[in-house]
Image (cartoon, grey):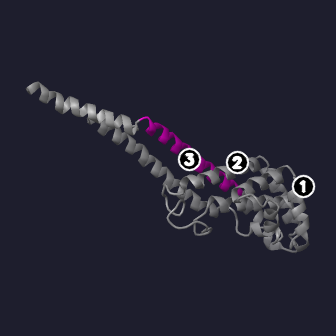
Amino acid sequence: MAYFVFVRERTSSFEDRVAQDRLEIRDAVFQLWTTLPQGTASLLPPTFSDAYRAAYPGKGRAEIVSQAATDLVFSAPVIDKVFEETRRVDTFGGPSSGRLYLWVLSQALTVMTPGTVEMPTKPDGVFPAIPTELGFDAWRRDFEKVRGALLLLSQFNDQLQADFQKFLNQNQVRHPNLTILGPLAKQGVARLFQNVNSIQTLLSDIDKQRLLGSQYSFNGFWLSIWLVVAFLSGVIFPLGLLV
């Protein structure tokens, strides 16, 4: 029985570590909305988001983010076509790639932060609204899809940031209040990537703790056999010797 108690304690320590990682992930998710400056998603024509989603009717939110990142980086005809079709209601005008970049990032935030105050799209009682296991795996699947898109975009960050600055320069006379978005966007995007990497590190630690814990977990059948053997050797056999 002493070994069983030892195993239970070891398993509990791994479970506690997983719970702590999940809590830290939840806190990091809530911080994601402080990264990008407000209003960056509204720099595109107001009908663009709906028009782009309509071009991919079978895709969910996470898939839309992945698709948009790919379309933007590889200059797919779809995203250019949608932008041209909505350009007539473009308030600003000028280059589009930098604005599209920040729009994709903002869409990624909506996927990664469901159930938060800023994006209350999930019911209370599931992750990340609270640091519970309920809903965690579903959130993680979406997070990992979006993270792949962010990794792709990060390879072209300098180029896309330069295009955004070009957009700001062309609008500095008509919209001088936009100028501040240049440095804020650079800092915000850098923090976004850093926070996503930190979350991924915690997810990797959860995988590690679960793997370590699995080495101490009992199969139900073999646990029953072990208890029977322990009972026989500790109780029945000694009683037999007394007969």
Among the two numbered marks 1 and 2 on one chain, the one whose residue lies closer to the N terminus: 1
- Kindly report the distance in space between the C-alpha atoms of the residues bearing marks 1 and 2: 21 Å
Residue lying at the far top of the rendered structure: 241
In the image, what residue occupies the spot 11% across and 24% down? Answer: 241
In this orientation, which residue lies closer to the viewer: 111 or 59? 59
Q: Is residue 158 visible?
A: yes
User: How far from the left and from the top, in percent, is residue 86?
Assistant: 88, 69
144 sits to left or right of 44: left
Q: Give the residue type at disc 1.
A: Pro
Q: Which mark is residue 203?
A: 3
Label 2: how many Cα within 10 Å (few below 14, some 14–19, many 20+): some
Secondary element under disc 1, as helix, strand or loop, is helix
Helix, strand or loop for disc 2:
helix
Q: Which residues are magenta?
A: 189-215
Q: Which residue is mark 1?
A: 77
Magenta part, dominant SS: helix
**Residue at the image position 70 percent from the left and 48 percent from the top:** 148
Q: Which residue is mark 2?
A: 148
Disc 1 or disc 3, which is closer to the eye? 1
Q: Quadrant of residue 117?
A: bottom right
